[in-house]
Image (tube, rainbow, N blue to C red):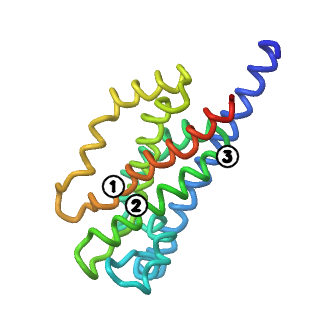
Amino acid sequence: MDLRERTRQAGGRAGSSAVGTAFFVAVLWVVEIIDVLTRHAVDRFASLRAWEFTDLPSIFTFSFAHYGWAHLVGNTALLLPFGFLLGLSGRRVAVQVTLVVMVCSGLAAWALTPPHSATAGASGIVFGWLTYLIVRGAWSKRWTEVALGLALLAVFGYVLWGVLPGAQGVSWQGHLGGAAGGLLSAWLINDKRSRSRF
């Protein structure tokens, strides 16, 4: 494959990743607009309530609801760059990582948060995407992924302190679960990719 073809493919992946990430974030903003217009009906429906077994399906919805614009803006600022970088690995990998992260974040929020308290927001996905991007090189052994992981750790490593108990009203449980999901998906996906080479 010549340089021109590689450049064309790289440009295609970047464009696809940018569109996919923008679409995901746009969905979050549309959901928040609907929430405001319905006087927070979305929050009541989509939030995940800890220790309520009938609420377990909300593991797949709570990441799409946010408690106000500031909450959404804060997550958006990190979702855009992390989602774009994740998307460069392809749509299938991005979807797989996101699903694993979402489930792990939701289970942690459900099991570790005080009973009946509600959790919402995509910050668990933020932590999962970031953790995945930082650690995947440990399994893939690709120098570009190792280098990117180290760069992200240097620039955004401070974000990972959010997995520890801190500010009141912030779900460190969901953050911890998301980070665990990022680690798990890095092992599951990239270990499989490494073994498939032999």
Q: Amino acid at mark 2?
A: Ser
Say which residue appears at 17% left-offset and 57% top-offset.
167
Q: Amino acid at mark 1?
A: His
Q: How many marks?
A: 3
Q: Provide residue 79's location: percent of width, then percent of height.
A: 47, 47
Q: Amino acid at mark 3?
A: Arg
Left or right of 195? Residue 132 is left
Q: Provide residue 36's location: percent of width, then percent of height.
A: 44, 74
Kindly identify which numbered label has been placed on residue 105.
Answer: 2
**Residue count near mark 1 (Cα–Cα under 10 Å), binned few <14, some 14–19, many ≥20:** many
Pointers 1 and 2 in contact (CB under 8 A)?
yes
**Residue count near mark 3 (Cα–Cα under 10 Å), binned few <14, some 14–19, many ≥20:** some
**Residue count near mark 2 (Cα–Cα under 10 Å), binned few <14, some 14–19, many ≥20:** many
Closer to the camera, 84 or 74? 84
Quarter containing the C terminus: top right
Q: Provide residue 13's location: percent of width, then percent of height.
A: 70, 34
Kindly identify which numbered label has been placed on residue 175.
Answer: 1
Mark 2 → mark 3, Cα distance in angstroms: 21 Å
- Earlier along the polypeptide chain: callout 3 or callout 1? 3
Element under label 1? helix
Say which residue appears at 64% left-offset and 48% top-offset.
20
Mark 3 → mark 1, Cα distance in angstroms: 23 Å
Q: Does 118 sit above or below residue 134?
A: below
Closer to the camera, 31 or 97? 97
Residue extending furthest bottom? 54
